[in-house]
Image (tube, rainbow, N blue to C red):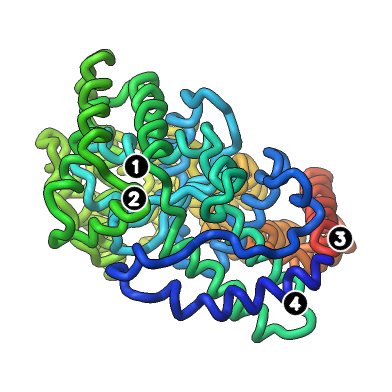
Amino acid sequence: MLNQFALFLALFLMTSLTTLTAPLSYATDLNLNLPDIELPEVMANSGSLGTAQEQQAGLALLRELRRRRPMIEDPELVDWINQLGQRLGSRSPNRNPLYFMIEKNHLVNAYTLTGGVIVINSGLILNTQSESELAAVIAHEIAHVSQRHLARMQEAGKNSPLMTGLGVLAGAAVASQSPDAAQAIVTSTLAMQAHQQIVFTQRAEAEADRVGLRILANAGFNTEAMPYFLEKLERSETNAYGDLTKYLYTHPMSIDRLSDTRSLVTQLPKRKPQDDLAYVVAREKLRLMTGQNATTLMTTQLKPTAQQYAQAYQALRSGNPTPATHLNANTPTLAILQAQALNELKRYAEAEQRLHGFAQQISTQAAFNLALATSQLGQNKTTLGLQTLAKLRLTETTSLEFFEAAQQLAQQAKQAAEASFYNASRSLRLGEYKHALATAEQALALPNTSPVTLAHLRQLQTEAERQLLNAARP
């Protein structure tokens, strides 16, 4: 039945592609209701996926998005947005798994997909003027997840939050028969979600505002940032920093909604937290990486540090590491940039020394981990360097660039099994299960592999086999 469903959905999605890529001004004319089709057995009779199935669909969708969409995979930015997101998510009324990604996209938008996948456009981040503004948007999206708005909308027979997941499923089902058709299905499916995301109802938006404000307050952010950002969207449909109509389309505004949000804020504790340096620096790095404009920051205290970082980072990107070596590296973020510059100059011992004061970052920050391992391997401390790489706590959203760099470092150290593990780990997070499985199996056959690496490879092998079995089920 799955193959029949896949073929029908392929035809539906491919015929919808030209409509989905129409200009935004025609978006109000779109009919995004589910067609009357036979659903796979996992959804038949129930009308929606249960939470476990939603999470599995979300995981598959996240991996497909990382393959197909221009996601930011810089280790520092990936860790930063996930640490911010998880800080807010820990205050959510329902602790569902959450995955945060940044898409390189100038449009001012953020969107939630099935299974707790939350994507924030670079244009939105650069349009915020404080960390609390960005946190307000993320808290709002988390509220959509915790309140299961996507599943509830699908149950109510409105537009389909599962269309992307099903489209990816369809693409996988026909890939062996026609790779070109599968590519067309996936492309059109992602166009549906990434360019014409779910249009939430006014009621869902109001609920997300209320729950999001509580999340924001409990996480210690300035709750006034939420109505301020909404007012900014209302004041201008477009500005020099991105198209604001996109956010307004996917998150409909009303006078009552804005008024209610302002009223709720007056009932919550007043906080005016100082922006974290990590937010200011991440914003500068994202601006330089994407070439997009950014609004003026509200904070003045951190502007000099942000400017110094931006100048040093841009110089390093241009092949001149010297300016970064002169930074006052009194924070992990600045120490990482300085160590990266010292590594470029082959001053490995100095780079390692710079990072020693922030050793607690080794398991949670991929960029720190890579800089330290590079400095150690540069001094021929092979065992120590590989141990450093292995200390990073890997997650589903760990940067793909981390796996690529770790693979290269392991290859330089002539550690084939470790290099294969990082290669296979990257493939797993892209949904390339056959490649991940084959790479893991080859590595398991290599001699003189450490017990720890063998255990990691077996775990990866088991996960790849499980995903392949799931994909093959009728």
Disc sitting over residue 337 in the figure: 2
In percent of the image, x 33 and y 36: which residue is there? 135
Q: Which quadrant, please, contains the N terminus?
A: bottom right
In percent of the image, x 80 and y 66: which residue is there? 2
Position in image of residue 112 (x %, y %):
48, 48
The three-letter code of the residue at mark 3 reads Arg
- Element assignment for label 1: helix
Can you see residue 401? yes
Residue 217 appears in which quarter of the rendering?
A: top left
**Are the residues tagged 3 and 1 within 8 Å (C-beta)?**
no
**Are the residues tagged 1 and 4 within 8 Å (C-beta)?**
no
Disc sitting over residue 333 in the figure: 1
**Are the residues tagged 2 and 4 within 8 Å (C-beta)?**
no
Between discs 3 and 2, the one toward the N terminus: 2
The alpha-carbon separation of the residues under discs 1 and 4 comes to 45 Å
Between discs 4 and 3, the one toward the N terminus: 4
CA neighbours of label 1 inside 10 A, class few (<14), some (14 to 19), many (20+)? some
Residue placed most toward the observer, 87 or 46: 46
Q: Which residue is mark 3?
A: 473
Residue 143 appears in which quarter of the rendering?
A: top left
CA neighbours of label 2 inside 10 A, class few (<14), some (14 to 19), many (20+)? many
Say whether residue 439 is left or right of residue 217: right
